[in-house]
Image: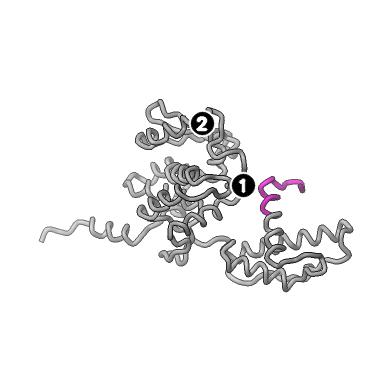
């Protein structure tokens, strides 16, 4: 592992290299060339393994880093990708995110619970994963760290607490994040959490699922007949695992509380971030218009 690389980075780069090699059906070094590698990456894109040109170029960068390393370390006598150009297309890092409607989210939960295991998680485990993500706005790595000890359900109001080594904000501030829970949700969690030892991770020790959380969710969306790509006011948008955070923020805004309160609930540090997460649907626009008072004529 190179200095400065995390375990997750190594896992992702290795996975990208293996995906390209498998898609191109390379069996030996002599078969590798820039045209075949580029075609394999475009095929992976078309098959939905990733969505943007920026990510496609990350696959190419992984392959080029590998072939360059093999040359520099005397494993091969040439680098077949030294002249491989970047893949052209939309250079934005991500597509806009969409959130699920209440009906689609409920359908996702119902269907997921009956699905077979994916990424070492049962259908029931994924059901609770998606539900807790949508209610707390926790990111995948934060969810992976949770044990029953993080939940404090016998106090008023109930809450969960994230270690400062896991929380994105905690890493910067050195403090823990405390996330208040709805009382009814806390009561829903209580019997499920009682099935675990207090220090047992709720979704196991394996990092397999949170490294590939978007891919895992994609299978469950398809099983539920829910589109992953949808047309919104921002253009073509994607539903991915981080959309659960957007769902939490949007639902918080719909309560009518001031934006500063919503920012506190969602652990957001600025109005700019709040605007990024809140999604406005056509039904929101209609509800707003219908709620506007008319003068007495």
Q: Residue at x 46, y 54 (%)?
A: 276
261 or 34, which is in the foreground?
A: 34
The residue that label 1 is drawn on is: 208
The image quarter containing residue 144 is: top right
The residue that label 2 is drawn on is: 196
- Can residue 280 be seen? yes
> Where does residue 132 sit, x and y in percent of width and height?
45, 42
Q: Residue at x 51, y 56 (%)?
A: 219
Crowd around label 2: few <14 · some 14–19 · many ≥20 (10 Å): few
Instruction: Please determine whether, in this image, residue 83 is positioned above or below residue 168.
Output: below
| Label placed on residue 200 | none
> Where does residue 47 sit, x and y in percent of width and height?
58, 66
175 or 151, which is in the foreground?
A: 151
Q: Residue at x 66, y 47 (%)?
A: 8
Q: Over which residues does the magenta segment extend?
A: 1-13
> Where does residue 274 sit, x and y in percent of width and height?
44, 50
Give the distance between the C-alpha atoms of the residues marked 2 and 1, in whole angstroms. Answer: 20 Å
The image quarter containing residue 174 is: top right
For mark 2, give the secondary structure.
loop
């Amino acid at each position: 592992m190179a200095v400065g690389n995390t375990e997750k980075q190594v896992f992702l780069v290795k996975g990208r290299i293996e995906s390209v090699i498998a898609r191109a059906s390379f069996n030996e070094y002599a078969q590798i060339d820039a045209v075949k590698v580029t075609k394999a990456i475009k095929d992976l894109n078309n098959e939905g393994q990733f969505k943007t040109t920026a990510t496609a170029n990350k696959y190419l960068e992984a392959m080029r880093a590998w072939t360059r390393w093999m040359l520099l370390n005397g494993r091969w006598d040439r680098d077949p990708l030294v002249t491989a150009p970047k893949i052209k297309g939309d250079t934005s890092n991500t597509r806009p995110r969409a959130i699920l409607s209440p009906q689609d989210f409920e359908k996702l939960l119902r269907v997921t619970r009956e699905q077979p295991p994916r990424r070492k998680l049962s259908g029931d485990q994924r059901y609770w994963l998606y539900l807790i993500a949508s209610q707390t706005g926790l990111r995948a790595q934060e969810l992976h760290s949770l044990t029953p000890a993080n939940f404090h359900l016998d106090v008023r109001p109930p809450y969960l607490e994230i270690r400062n080594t896991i929380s994105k904000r905690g890493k910067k501030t050195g403090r823990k994040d405390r996330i208040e829970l709805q009382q009814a949700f806390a009561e829903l969690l209580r019997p499920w959490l009682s099935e675990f030892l207090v220090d047992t991770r709720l979704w196991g020790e394996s990092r397999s699922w949170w490294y590939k959380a978007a891919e895992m969710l994609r299978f469950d969306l398809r099983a539920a007949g829910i589109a992953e790509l949808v047309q919104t006011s921002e253009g073509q948008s994607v539903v991915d695992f981080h959309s659960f955070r957007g769902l939490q923020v949007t639902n918080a805004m719909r309560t009518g509380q001031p934006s500063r309160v919503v920012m506190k609930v969602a652990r957001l540090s600025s109005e700019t971030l709040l605007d990024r997460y809140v999604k406005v649907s056509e039904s929101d626009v209609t509800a707003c218009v219908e709620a506007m008072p008319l003068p007495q004529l």
